[in-house]
Image: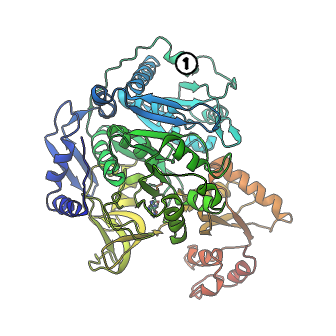
Amino acid sequence: MDLRIKSFDEYKEKYKQSVDNPDGFWDQIARSFIWRMPYHTVCEWNFEQPDVKWFLGGKLNITENCLDRHLEQRGNKLALIWEPNDPKERFVRWTYRELYEKVCEFANALKAQGIQKGDRVVVYMPMIPELTVAVLACARIGAVHSVVFAGFSAMAIADRVNDAQAKMIITADGLNRGAKQVPLKRVVDEALTHCSSVNKVIVYNCLDWSPNMAPGRDLWWHDAVNGMAKECPAEEMDSEDMLFILYTSGSTGKPKGVVHTHGGYMVYTAYTFQNVFQYEESDIYWCTADVGWITGHSYIVYGPLLSGATTLMFEGVPTWPDPGRFWQVCDKHSVNQFYTAPTAIRALMACGDDHVLSYSLDSIKVLGTVGEPINVEAWRWYHIHVGKERCPIVDTWWQTETGGIMISGLGNLSPMNPAHAGYPLPGIQPVLLDQEGNEIVENGVEGYLCIKHPWPSILRTTYGDHERCRVTYFSHYQGHYFTGDGAKRDENGMYRIIGRVDDVINVSGHRFGTAEIENAINSNKIAVESAVVGYPHDIKGQGIYAYVVCENIPEDQEVARAEIIETVVEHIGKIAKPEKIQFVSGLPKTRSGKIMRRILRKVAEGEPDKLGDTSTLLDPQIVEEIVSGAL
Ligand code: WTA
C-alpha cells in the first residue's frame, strides 16, 4: 500500500483532483486498506451542526490494518524500536509478529477484566513500548482509549476520567525522565479518590517500586497477561465508531475531549505519514513526541504502523545524560526520518554546536518539526547542523482536532522556505478570512486560518458536549472549520502560521487555555482574581505570565509566588507553571467588566509604550501600576 506521491508535479495534480472531486480522491486511497465490509458512501457532511461522516457503512478494525495485514510480508520486519531513558540500558526491538502477539495478549487481558466495546480506558503511562501495546489493545477490542500525558497532575487526571466516565486506568509504578523518576501510581491513587467510574487499574512494573495496590481494584500488568492467548480476533467496528478521546485545552476553563473515529483517522494518518516523511520500506523513522499528545498518537503509533513502518519510541529527554542524546540515538539506530519540536531544537541550540557536531547523522533523509511556529534562527541551525544542508525540513502544521498533518512540505519534493509550513496536503482546503469572515483570495495576505471542506480525520465532536464543538470550531465563520490560528499566505501561495488568535498559549508546543490556568490560580486563597497571558520565551516559544490580583499585595512575594505555582502544579501539572507572577491590585477592565488582555500582553512582552488606546478603561491608573511593576 504505497500511497506516496513522488514528485511536486504529481502533488499539484493530486491536489487539483482532491479539490475537484474529494470523494473520488479519498475513495482511491481508502481502497488500499482492509475493510471487513466496504463503505457505501465516501463522505456526508455539514459544518452547521456539525455532522461529518466518512466511509459510511464501512466495517473495519484499525489494528487489523496496523498489524494483521503486515504479518504475511512483514512479520519479521521491525515494527517498534524502543530506546530507553538510560543509554546504558538495553533497547527493545519488536517485529510486527511480536507486536501483534503482545497486543492480542493484552487485549485478551482487558476483556478478562471486563472491558467491552465502547468502554473508555484512560492510559497514564511512561514512554515505554507497553504504552503502544495498551493503546492498540484498546482499539482491538473496540474500547475507547484516552491517553493522558504522564506530566499531568492527579486533579487533571480526575477531570479527564470523570468527563470520559472511564472504567479503567492503565498506568505504571513510575517513570524515568532524565536523571529523575516520577511516581505515576501514587498520582493515579490520588486522582482516584475523586473518581467513581473506575473499577480496575492495571499497573506495569517499570521501576520495581512496590506501590500500594488496592485489593480487588489494582492488578499488575504481568499478572493480567499471565496465561492469555496471543491471538485475539479484532472487534468489528463501524467507520464512525469512536477510536479515541484526547483532551486538549481551549479558550474556556475545562479541557475538551476531542473525538476521533476508526475509519477516517486511519486513512488520513497513513496517507499523511507516507507522504510528508516520504517513508520508504526499509527506513527507520523517529518521532520524539510523547504518545500523550496527538503527535504521538498519529505519528508514533498509528500512521507508521498502518504503513508497515519501523517506528522508534524514546523514553528519555533531549538533554540527558548530555545534549547530544538525540543525535547519538539517530546514529545508533540509523534513523532516516527525524521529527521533533522547535522548543527541543532551541534548547539544544542553546547548549552549543559541539554536541551535534560529534555525530555523523549520515542516515537522516528528512527532518520535521511540529507544534509551534519555528523561528528562522532555529530552522537554520537544524538545517545546517542536523540536516548538514542536505536534508529537507518539513514544517508540519496541524492540531489535535485535525488528527493529522494539514499543511506541510512533502519530504524533498516541495520547495522550502524557512518558518513556512508551505502548501496544504491533498484534500485540505485552507482559506484566510478577514475580521468580517470574508475570504481573502489573493496572495501576500494575512488572516484567520479556516478550512472549508472536511478531511477524513477532522474531529467528530467534543466528548459529551457536541454544542461545545459547534461553538468552538464551526460558529465563528459560517460553513468553515475555524482553527484558532492566524496565518499569512505569501506571493507563492505558501502558508506561514503566525500563532493562536484565541486565548490559548503554546508553551513548548503544549497548549493551555488561559482560563484553565486562571481557574487554578483563583483557587488559591491569595488570589482574588487573575489574568494569564503568553509572552515570547527564547526556548519555550511562549512563557506564562500571570497577573494576580490580591486584596493586599503579599509582603513576602517569593513565598506567595511559590504557593501560586504549587496550586497550578496541583491542578494541571508542572508543565503549566507560570514563569512570571506579578501581584497587582486590579486588572485593566473595560466599563463592561471585560479584561483588556491586549494591554496585559503588551506589558508582558516588554512593550509598555505600545499599549494603544486606554481611554475606555474603567480605571486607567491601574495600567501605570502594572507597567511600573512589570517583571
Ligand atoms: C500550533 C499539535 C506553527 C498551532 C500537532 C496549532 C503550529 C496548535 C505548528 C495545535 C506549526 C502546530 N507551525 N504552529 N508547524 N504545528 N502549531 O493540538 O497554533 O497540540 O493550532 O497539535 O499548535 O496544537 P496541538
Q: Nearer the viewer, residue 473 or 550?
A: 473
Residue 523 x/y as whole percent: 68, 54
Q: Quadrant of residue 284?
A: top left
Tell me which corner region of the image, top left, top right, bottom left or bottom right, holds residue 619. bottom right
Q: How is the image coloured?
A: rainbow
Q: Residue at x 40, y 45 (%)?
A: 298
Measuring 70% from the left and 84% from the top, which residue is drawn there? 621
What residue is pinned by disc 1?
222
- Residue 130 is at least partly visible in this image: no
Indicate the position of residue 613 as horizontal and vertical percent values: 56, 88
Q: Quadrant of the C terminus?
A: bottom right
Q: Residue at x 56, y 50 (%)?
A: 327
Q: Quadrant of the N terminus?
A: top left
Q: Nearer the viewer, residue 344 or 122?
A: 344
* Residue 366, quarter of picture: bottom left
Residue 70: where, in percent of width, then height? 30, 30
